[in-house]
Amino acid sequence: MAVQKPSIPKGTRDFGPEKMVRRNYIFSVIRSVFEQFGYMPLETPTMENLSVLTGKYGDEGDQLIFKMLNSGNYLSKTTAEDFQAGAKHLLPKIAEKGLRYDLTVPFARFVVMNRNEITFPFKRYQIQPVWRADRPQKGRYREFYQCDADVVGTDSLICEAEIIQMINKVFKGLNITDYSIKMNNRKILSGIVETIGAPGKETDFCVAIDKLDKIGFDKVLEELAGKGFSEDAIEQAKPILKLAGDNQSLLAQSKEILALSADGSKGVEELEEIFTYLDKFGAQDHHVDFDITLARGLSYYTGAIFEVKVNNVSIGSVSGGGRYDNLTGVFGLPDVPGVGFSFGVDRIYDVLEELDLFPKDNLVTTQLMIVNFDEASETHGLGLLAQLRNAGIKSEIYPNSAKLKKQMNYANKKAIPFVLMVGSEEISSGIYSLKNMETGEQLKLTIDQVIEQMK
Amino acid sequence: MAVQKPSIPKGTRDFGPEKMVRRNYIFSVIRSVFEQFGYMPLETPTMENLSVLTGKYGDEGDQLIFKMLNSGNYLSKTTAEDFQAGAKHLLPKIAEKGLRYDLTVPFARFVVMNRNEITFPFKRYQIQPVWRADRPQKGRYREFYQCDADVVGTDSLICEAEIIQMINKVFKGLNITDYSIKMNNRKILSGIVETIGAPGKETDFCVAIDKLDKIGFDKVLEELAGKGFSEDAIEQAKPILKLAGDNQSLLAQSKEILALSADGSKGVEELEEIFTYLDKFGAQDHHVDFDITLARGLSYYTGAIFEVKVNNVSIGSVSGGGRYDNLTGVFGLPDVPGVGFSFGVDRIYDVLEELDLFPKDNLVTTQLMIVNFDEASETHGLGLLAQLRNAGIKSEIYPNSAKLKKQMNYANKKAIPFVLMVGSEEISSGIYSLKNMETGEQLKLTIDQVIEQMK
């Protein structure tokens, strides 16, 4: 039989025990904060009908959706003409389903399909993988997890203030201290284009200023000129893009600049209200910096937008989100406003690794291994093992009496912190040697003392 | 714009908060037992190369694998002749990847690809969904979770005894008390066909006796006759299939019957050894019943096989597994024996529901909601909320001052057990009304007392 050398698809990953334990640590911190704020879990199917997915992510997005061949004879509804007409024409006749591309569209679908059972405001979180047929490259995968939380059915800005706090609590839980939550408001961006006399050119404006970090101030102005912004408009934009000061001062300056724009003024007011809510929550160290140049993907945000970066780490934003007016309109349910945000787990993982912030002790799986010397040792050890496990201690015995070196090597590789020696002397005395694998220190203890020690 | 009525693919499900919380409860019990026994988590990609999946599940299985269209112009490598040649011929030219069909093949692939990094024996558990393009029907889904644990690289029967204990601990954790773990050994089944003079007809024998429960003794004998078993063989099989007694007695009887079959005798010995290990572990109430008629899917098992049924519930087996000699041979790595088992989470869910065993209190997400009467109430409430959350209490405030009835309805629907009233009187006195939503009882408490109470 020909033997295959197995491989995994490009852009996908296996997560072995070490990585899993670290990822689960991140997920559990995030999950517990979501739940502390009243968000409840949701999971949607991996496959969605293409009618649900298509047209929601732009033309490029549609291309990047993984499509599933219909099962059985997938050609049964096709003709030679369909084939001749090409891949795009043939597609709907051979594929009806695709893989989840993000968590927002499935959430919107869920809300619409269950609108009569859901009590609004509906706070849900969702931690699941998504798939994109992107060209794989460093840090960009075809399968990756998203962690979203959204609350829909309310326009209360308490929700924004709570999201800020959730970000703070997650970072605190992960011991990340040096980070910044940049916040802006979509209405402020409308207000700016209105104020500089370029109404309707909002998308172009946002696309350009989104590149400030990458290409710099002058190149952004060039791009604006290229997109048909008048010299006058650009002159007026300059000082706005260069506004400086603390949050209070920036809010005051923006208010003045945007005074004649209803939209712009509303945007500033909303930001002020969010800061007020943070005060009422007593959230002083909230890490929020108002940044009038933050644009973020424009598509469906209509209010506050925010993005989180960890300082002194060359990794892009690790979280972000914003408010939208109409999540579910595309599925026929109007007037469902809400606000949501997302954590990028792969990036957070990289941050924790780069800053060496993964806790050492917490991530242990097996806490203790019993060395298996011989049959008597094994027999006695099995009884001890049952006691350890009944006491809630994660433990195992080496499954046969292999050479000591081999057993110790196993414990080492598996990062098991303690090893229990059960030789003939130990069996007769009931006093066992508990070896600390890191320090090499050995203690002589009864099994009750071992249990005590391990707890 | 035409509005679509959204739907989800046949055979798939959304899991809303209530179901998620219950499913997560099951997963967490299983996960904690797996870890208590030294098993470590693994996750593999949703997509596998079809070269890895195909040929591992039989012809029928190959049909049921969901295949992914290649991204981009998937027709680029095809000709009109390929199309004419039909779906089966065209498939490999337009699809290279498929969805995970089970957790065993991806695990085998992982072991082979990482054999130099893995320290054997390797104990892994894996809790992930799998996909099958089966015809959906009651209780059979196209997307469902599997929970597998396997240990590979050892033939120690301690592993079997530990698996029995893991099943016992999971069921104890879930409060399922009335169940049976049927156990047999593949070598005993070989021994039987050898002994009754029908060597080599093992598969037919197993397929037939696998139906004992469904079609009864006489029909099984008919099927054996139909498959070419001689009258004499069938006469000899009869008493074997009707063996009765407790484990000790059954083992003794089998030993005698299979005395002339090396395989059969080995099988009985292995079972005896597993029972001995259970004794050494002190696992008395192990629920194991030796059942010489248990056949189970034959394909790759070579030693102990077992299957778990909950009594007095009309739901099939909820767990099962067995030992195999050669997990990874198909990928070019011989001599990797192991033993594994799996929990059927959907069925366990149904069992817990049918027996009303889901814990009432544990599954609460939000523990307390603050009623939002008016601006003063909200402002004061936000401060209290921060205190509650800092104390680790899952809590929320209704995000605006809606009608009381609406707020109470929200708390009810979300099954929030406590509601905190913060009116003007409460604000000035610092004594708040904590209402138990189930009993209607109201307590007057300070915020510290509320926190105390909630813990």
Image (tube, coloured by chain):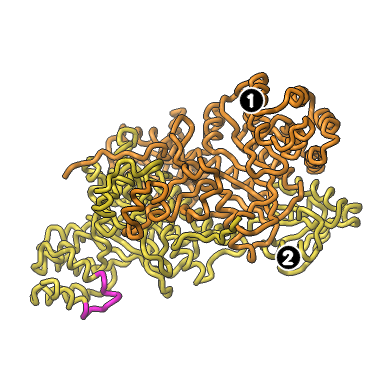
Chain colours: A orange, B yellow
Region of the chain picked out in magenta, as a range? B210-219
Q: Nearer the viewer, residue B287 or B167?
A: B167
Q: Which residue is mark 2?
A: B409
Mark 1 vs 2: CB contact within 8 A: no
Residue A297 numbered tag: none
Pick out the residue farthest to the bottom: B218
List x then y, in percent, for residue A238: 75, 23
Q: Residue at x 38, y 61 (%)?
A: B319
User: What is the count of numbered marks?
Assistant: 2
Q: Residue at x 77, y 63 (%)?
A: B435
Query: In the figure, residue A435 lies in which quadrant?
Result: top left
Q: Is B216 one of the magenta-colored residues? A: yes
Q: Nearer the viewer, residue A313 or B91?
A: B91
List x then y, in percent, for residue B242: 22, 76
List x then y, in percent, for residue A436: 45, 33
Circle 2 — which element?
A: helix
Q: Main secondary structure of the magenta part?
A: helix
Residue B38 visible in the shown view: no
The chain identifier of the residue carrying mark 2 reads: B
Is A323 situated left or right of B108 in this image? right
Q: Residue at x 29, y 44 (%)?
A: B78
Label 2, residues with CA under 10 Å away: few <14, some 14-19, many ≥20: few
Amino acid under disc 2: Asn
Query: In the figure, residue B60 lies in which quadrant?
Result: bottom left
Nearer the observer, disc 1 or disc 2? 1
Give above or below for A52 relative to A246: below
Q: CA distance from mark 1 to mark 2?
A: 55 Å
Q: Is A297 one of the magenta-colored residues? A: no
Q: Which residue is mark 1?
A: A226
The chain identifier of the residue carrying mark 1 reads: A
Give above or below for A117 relative to A370: below
Amino acid under disc 1: Gly
